[in-house]
Amino acid sequence: MATKLSAEEVLRYQQDGVVAPITVIPPAVAKELRRRLESVEKCFPQQIGPEKRNNAHYVLTCLDEIVHHEEILDAVECLIGPDIILTNTVLFIKEPNSLHHVTYHQDATYMGLEPQDGLTAWIALTESTRENGCVRVIQGSHLLDIQQHIDTFGEDNILTRGQQIEDIDEEHALDIELEPGQMSLHHARTIHGSHPNKTADRRIGIALQSFAHPSTRQVHGEDYALLVRGSDGYGNFIKGPRPKAEIDLANVEFRNKVNARLSEILYAGAEKQREY
């Protein structure tokens, strides 16, 4: 199993703003991670329900293991260097035959991070296919500035504000199909979205968003991050704890504080706000 990106893959990321698929977790391990996640969902729905999917890595060991997975970090290091922080995670779960979708957007638009050269790692815990709503990207769009986004607050839109870029030419969109345990890496300015899940099984993925160099700063003030590799000589972010149990209820209050701050950042300038 490759643990680092080849020179060709690095060049593809630089040119296209995305590289995939990258196998980082054995399929059997990915299947077990899914089992553990769904077990916690069933037992603690108030902590990991549909409106509690941001930054669950602070309370769930199964997600903390993904965040610190060596082969994921090896690949990220090839693109941003050996000192790496992670600001947030998001569970993207589409239920079977649901209308949930993600409109085309750029992650950097609302994250408040400068410079805007971080990246998102999207790890599949189930198959992610065209039929169940895999991520679709516009190659090379990371070379553009931030495009105008319209807030729709669409009921079936998974994004916080239902933000979208209009007039996307989908003929040139690339489907990022992944097997369980594979991931994609995309630049913070890469335009991407996804369609609904039309299959009989859940589509489960976790976005580690954003991986960045510790010199990155939050333009909206105070923010939180984990140092996941190397060292941080800047101190621009408050560092969070790692869970010490399969579900660490002692960290719930901290996770809630992080999410409240994240909402302030994501909804800055918005006319209204949803509960997630």
Image (cartoon, rainbow, N blue to C red):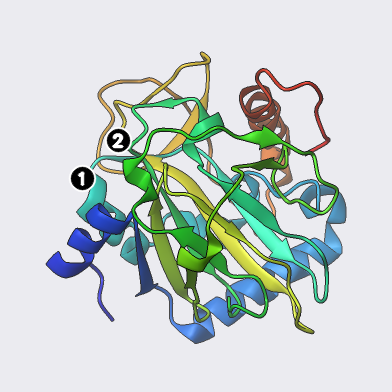
In this view, the residue in front, 65 or 131, is 131
Q: Secondary structure at mark 2?
A: loop
> In this orientation, does residue 148 appear?
yes
Nearer-N-terminus badge (1/2): 1
Amino acid type for the residue under numbered disc 1 = Gly
Which circle marks residue 81 in the picture?
1
Q: Position of residue 249 (x, y in %)?
A: 73, 45
Quarter of the view holding residue 114: top left
Secondary structure at badge 1 equals loop
Say if mark 1 contacts mark 2, CB within 8 Å: yes
**x%, y% of residue 216?**
34, 27
Image coords of residue 131 (percent x, y): 66, 80
Q: Is residue 214 above or below residue 96?
A: above
Give left or right: position of 18 versus 202: left
Q: Quadrant of residue 60?
A: bottom right
Classify residue 189 as left or right of residue 266: left
- Taking depth in this image into account, of 242 and 173 the one nearest to the observer is 173
Q: Which of the labelled discs sits on residue 213, or is there none?
A: 2
Viewer-proximal residue among 167 and 115: 167
Residue at x 76% of width, y 70% of height: 39
**Three-letter amino acid code at disc 2?**
His
Residue 266 rendering spot, x and y as whole percentages: 63, 29
Q: Residue at x 37, y 70 (%)?
A: 20
Image: 149 above or below 62:
above
Which quarter of the rendering shows the N terminus?
bottom left
Residue occupying the point 23% across, 53% down: 14
Q: Name the residue located 69 percent from the left edge and 28 percent from the top edge.
A: 263
Outermost residue on the left side: it is 7
Residue 115 position (above or below residue 200): above
